[in-house]
Image (spheres, rainbow, N blue to C red):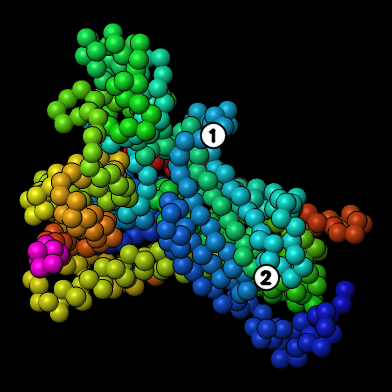
Amino acid sequence: MSLTSKNEETPLINEKGLRMDGRRLDELRPIHLEVGYLSRADGSAYIEHGKNKIVAAVYGPRELHPRHLAQSDRALLRVTYRMATFSVSERKRPAPSRREHEISMVIRQALEPMLFLKMYPRSVVDVFIQVLEADGGSRCASTTVASLALADAGIPMRSLVAGVAVGKVAETLVSDLSDVEDKVGDADVPVAMASDRGEITLLQMDGKLTPKEFATVLSMAEDGIAKIHQMQKTVLQEKYAQIRDELDEIEEEAKDVEPVSDKPPEDKTVSKSTPDQEKPTADREDPSVTEKAKEPEKIEKPPSKRSKRKTTSKDKGASKAAKRTRKKTTESDTEMKGA
Amino acid sequence: MIVSLYFEQQDIVVPGQHLAEGDYHHGDGAYKEKESIYASVIGLVKIRGKTIYVVPLKGRYFPKPRDIVIGTIIEVTMNGWLVEINSPYPAMLPMMQALNRRDMVRAKNNPRAFYDVGESVVAEILASDRTRDPLITTRGRGLGKIRGGLLFKIVPARVPRLIGRKGSMINMIKSELDCDVVVGQNGIVWLMGNPAHCEIAVEAIRQIEREAHTSGLTDRVREVITLKLADLKGE
């Protein structure tokens, strides 16, 4: 395996331990997220993850055609991942490829366990993912946007899903592989998870890793995803908080005497120190109820991880010994109240 | 038992956000897992008694009995009409629920004389469960075919805001602009009146839709309407 990039000039990892694009080993590429990117979709989002540029649009839940696909107990989730012809340097032929079908399925399976699809039986939720520019790890970035678009569409879900690809490049474990690193590297492990729940919904591996390396790489993915997940939450909240804050300012200038809850979006999780302000009397009468002050960080902490099945790749002697594993979160004991 | 709330009334929350722990119940837009309540949609959290719920800022309309909706006929069938009501399911409008007995006889021969494809109706949801398509009726006060006026869509989640507490917002628009407004719970709005005034009403409703999650909205909208009306007179 060559240790250099295609142009043989820049090493994949230089003597300072920095990567081709100057990132540290565990550093993510710059990420930019937008919600409500399209006006006619029920929900939409846009992501720039490194040089990836991806739009996701969500329609539904809506009437399902053809009818025979309908499931009587839940909504169908249809995910379509498509790459634009101009998204890669060599023109991608516009017909849907095997790879696109696979990625569509993989993304669907990464999102499905987090959605409360049973609230809308017989209907369909359509997710369209269009890759405008691809730069490695596009299935992970697509999962991130798609989840955001679903949240923007108001589809009830357990949690947001984010993804990142980790792997091994030039005998070194790295996070968030770029296109070149993905192609030249030794192993590529795309991971998507619901970070705050500690549940993995997408886990694939291409290449070889020792069990120990795999464990390391997975924890790197967890750290990366936690960061992306935080960005997802922030951008969703900001979309609405921004309008509210702007209006608050206008009102203050106009010296309008209107009581407004004007908390900045960041300290949304501030504890309730004065329980008697807005709480109805029913709670106050109960002496056992204690309002405890909590730090915001407490909430960000993911709950105890469920035991993860670790997989090692077995050498099959084939040119590409790839073992793909997937762990689905179980339909848990969650209860959900109907509309 | 530890009982904690992690939010303040009216906070904007995102799916998966941990809202409370302990002896609480979950309402719409929230779910409970073990002893914790989490948000399941993006919206504003509220707590009433021990119930925590999230008022969604986005989302589709889901038919509920006794809701007034506005829909468009999409199909004429043997014994009624299929109506698109902006929900995941089309609604059934049986002839029985649309016409009186005398008209029924005529309608059997020519149902299109009463409602044809493309026409719009104000209707009330009679029954709706997830196993079958919802049933609607056009018999009742204020229900029936729409003749003239202006129809447009807003996000169904913002309908309660547009109506306001006991209709305060919608009544303000009606009285300020002297036009008739019918708001379907499914997010379709029907405006009738002076075209110039209707245009102002559309703008006002768009503003309400955009700023639904802010307070002091009624006064702000009233101001805008007054300004626009003054403009109109000036010209």
Q: Which residue lies furthest to the bottom in this view?
A: A16
Disc 2 is attached to a residue of which chain? A
**How many numbered marks appear?**
2
**Quadrant occupied by the C terminus of chain B:** bottom left
Along the line of sight, which residue is nearer the eye, B14 or B191?
B191
Name the element at disc 2. Answer: loop
Left or right side of B145 for B86: right
Q: In this view, does B114 lie above or below A244?
A: above
Mark number, residue A117: none
Q: Which amino acid does label 2 sit on?
A: Asp
Residue count near mark 2 (Cα–Cα under 10 Å), binned few <14, some 14–19, many ≥20: some
From where the camera sits, is residue B196 visible? Answer: yes
| Res. A304 in view | no
Q: Mark 1 points at which residue?
A: A65
Name the image quarter holding residue A68.
top right
| Mark number displayed over residue A135 | 2
Q: Is residue A88 left or right of residue A28?
A: right
Side of A283 where A169 appears, left or right:
right
Label 1's element?
loop
User: Relative to residue B133, is residue A263 depicted above or below?
Assistant: below
Q: Where A253 falls versus B88 (above or below)?
A: below
Inspect the magenta stretch and tell me whether residue B232 lies in it.
yes
- Residue B33 on the magenta segment: no
Q: Which residue is drawn at 14% across and 28% down?
A: B141
Task: Give the main secondary structure of the magenta stretch.
Answer: helix
Determine the CA span between mark 1 and mark 2. Answer: 34 Å
Q: Residues within 10 Å of mark 1 (few under 14, many from 20)?
A: few
- Percent x, y of residue B225: 14, 61
Q: Which residues, given as a range, are shown in magenta?
A: B226-235
Query: On the image, which quarter does residue B214 sit in?
Result: bottom left
Q: Which chain carries label 1?
A: A
